[in-house]
Image: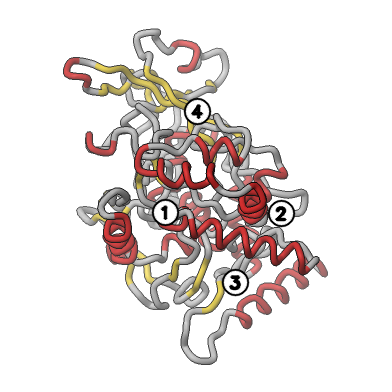
Amino acid sequence: MISKLFKLVAVLAIALIALSADGSPQEAPQSFELQNGLLSQKQFDEAQEAFEEVETPKGGLGVHFNESSCLGCHAPPSDRGLPGGSSPVTELRAGHFGGYNKFIPAPGGTLITAQAVGGATTEVKALPDSENVRDRFITPSLFGAGFVECVADETLRKIAREQAAQSGGRIRGVIREVPILEAPERTGVGRFGWAAQHASLLSFSADAYRNEMGITSVLEPKDNTFFGQPVDDGVADPEDTGGKFGGDVELFTDFMRALSAPSRLLPSDQKERNEIEEGFKAFKSIGCAVCHLPELVTAKAGSSVNGGAFRVPKALGDKRFHPYGDFLLHDIGTGPNILREGMPPETSGKIRTAALWGMGSRLLNGDPLLHDGSARSLEEAVQRHKNSAAQEAEKFKRLRESERVRLLKFLKSL
């Protein structure tokens, strides 16, 4: 009881800090341990319980699935942290190239699940050699996702235009207009997932519940298949009932929207802080901040987003946050050959910019970098940038050793 009271007081304190005296955007709360004030403590506890719940076949866990809980992929970033972090857990996607070098997904779709109920054969073990175009995607963090969702579509479109102007057309993030499942026939600017395949957290939740756990909902009512062949799990669809779109799907969404932005790892020593600030200047000077944007601002409270299906609440509205990402697709030479379902051909080889907030905690946990986890250090990740980011990688290489050390120290502080 005392612990819950402490959490409630802390959440209220965060909310008070976020109040603006002059109406200007205020800093979004940063914490791995406290929510952002969106929910009451009772509501947040209920949402967290659903997020951590281990699903079973009786409850609709698919015959073929990747994990049996959200927590299975999105673990806490620290011993005392809330669930929702990134992790080295990967999902496999596959397909092959056909005539005219056209990418063709594996039967049933690019996602290849890794687990199966009982003695059923897993998709990953049965994947035909003919599906020889394969790539893995690490689990991204969910902290701060509510603020990302509440950035107006036009803000992201403007960023893409400004990038082109700043770089003489060399850099321009690709905007994906994607369906919003809870707003039929409406689309929004994609921002969630490595392919920017979702604009809303409700759509993202329903998609993950079906694809990663094999549990259907009103928004995703069809069971997973085994390479395109229907597999009956014995539970009537949709399996997630309750609420308007599914009780669990809505609780997952509430939990993600309530997560604070990632905390920074800033030293107490002023000299080290000064070096981090110098590192940030180097980060900007070589052009990294064109795509890894230091700051975004959410739409005002009461604004309509997600095709009119969601109104920005006070806890998320008119907040300034620091993702160090633009949530757009770019060709930086490390992207996948996989072309996911619904992606137009011109997005081949492109990947959503990795938001760098929370980088310090990821490195402390030993998490790999880049979308597939193939980079083991910051230096490697930066130096592998090519194509539209080749000039920036070359500038990083040419920095004086002291500047490069400070830049890396800055990244480790995020």
Secondary structure at badge 2 equals loop
Check residue 329 in the rendering and tell me which mark sits there, or answer none.
none
Q: Give the residue number, with chain letter if any, for mark 4.
A: 65
Are discs 4 and 2 less than 8 Å apart at CB? no
**Kind of residue at badge 2:** Gly
**Kind of residue at badge 1:** Cys
Check residue 291 in the rendering and tell me which mark sits there, or answer none.
1
Are discs 4 and 3 less than 8 Å apart at CB? no
Q: Quadrant of residue 102?
A: top left
Query: As drawn, is 215 to the left or to the right of 106?
Result: right
First in sequence: mark 1 or mark 3?
Answer: 3
First in sequence: mark 4 or mark 3?
Answer: 3
Calculate the distance from the C-alpha at mark 4 to the C-alpha at mark 2. 26 Å
Secondary structure at badge 1 equals loop
| Residue 366 rendering spot, x and y as whole percentages | 69, 38
Q: Give the residue number, with chain letter if any, for mark 2.
A: 81
Residue 241 versus residue 372 in the image, above or below: below
Q: Quadrant of residue 363?
A: top right
Mark 4, other Cα within 10 Å: few <14 / some 14–19 / many ≥20: many
Q: Nearer the viewer, residue 404 or 372?
A: 404
Calculate the distance from the C-alpha at mark 4 to the C-alpha at mark 3. 33 Å
**Can residue 228 be seen in this snapshot?**
no
Secondary structure at badge 3 equals loop
Q: Nearer the viewer, mark 1 or mark 4?
A: 1
Q: Quadrant of the N terminus?
A: bottom right
Calculate the distance from the C-alpha at mark 2 to the C-alpha at mark 1. 29 Å
First in sequence: mark 2 or mark 1?
Answer: 2
Residue 365 versus residue 279 in the image, above or below: above
Q: Give the residue number, with chain letter if any, for mark 3.
A: 37
Q: Nearer the viewer, residue 319 or 301?
A: 319
